[in-house]
Image (cartoon, rainbow, N blue to C red):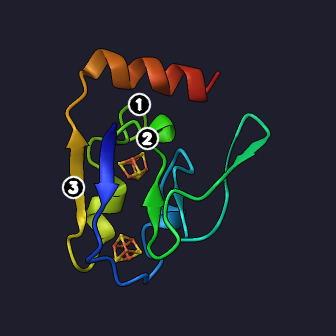
Amino acid sequence: MSLVITDECINCGACEPECPNTAIYEGGVEWELNGESHDPLSEEFYYIVPDKCTECKGHYDESQCVAVCPVDCIEVGVEESEDTLMERYNQLNG
Ligand code: SF4
Ligand code: SF4
């Protein structure tokens, strides 16, 4: 599942452009993968799509969203192995 944004999010939008996997969306906005649109995972706060988050593995040494969030409201949801995250990275990046 990787990272999740909690309800302490202040909707500043700082994290969204930093995500190398475009896994972060504004509340109420549909998310996309492989050309398909899906219902928003939150209507109120920015959210992270679990199937698109690699905890930045494959791109950076640290999670970019966590690094920029001014209120530290991004947490680990469910721990995933390095192999799982890299497998996802390879799927997302062809
Ligand atoms: S940890 Fe990285 S890949 Fe996951 S949502 Fe944050 S910026 Fe995107
Ligand atoms: S940077 Fe933090 S507070 Fe701002 S939108 Fe992202 S999760 Fe919410």
Q: Are marks 2 and 3 in contact (CB under 8 Å)?
A: no
Residue 14: image x %, image y %?
44, 75
Please name the amino acid that badge 1 sits on: Gly
Which residue corresponds to the image point at 37% horizontal and 41% vertical from the top-left? 56
Residue 16: image x %, image y %?
50, 65
Residue 41: image x %, image y %?
51, 56
| Nearer to the camera, 11 or 93 | 11
Residue furthest right as drawn = 35
User: Are there few (<14), some (14-19), or many (20+) residues within 10 Å of tag 3?
Assistant: few
Q: Earlier in the sequence, mark 2 or mark 3?
A: 2
Comparing labels 1 and 2, the label whose residue is closer to the camera: 2
Q: Which residue is mark 2?
A: 50
Please name the amino acid that badge 2 sits on: Pro
Q: Secondary structure at mark 1?
A: loop
Q: Which residue is mark 3?
A: 75
In the image: residue 23, left or right of residue 80: right
Q: Which residue is mark 1?
A: 58
Please name the amino acid that badge 3 sits on: Glu
User: Compared with residue 27, is residue 86 higher up or lower down, i.e. above or below?
Assistant: above
What distance separates the C-alpha of mark 1 from that of mark 2? 16 Å
User: Compared with residue 3, is residue 7 higher up or lower down, i.e. above or below?
Assistant: below
Occupied quadrant, residue 70: bottom left
Occupied quadrant, residue 64: bottom left
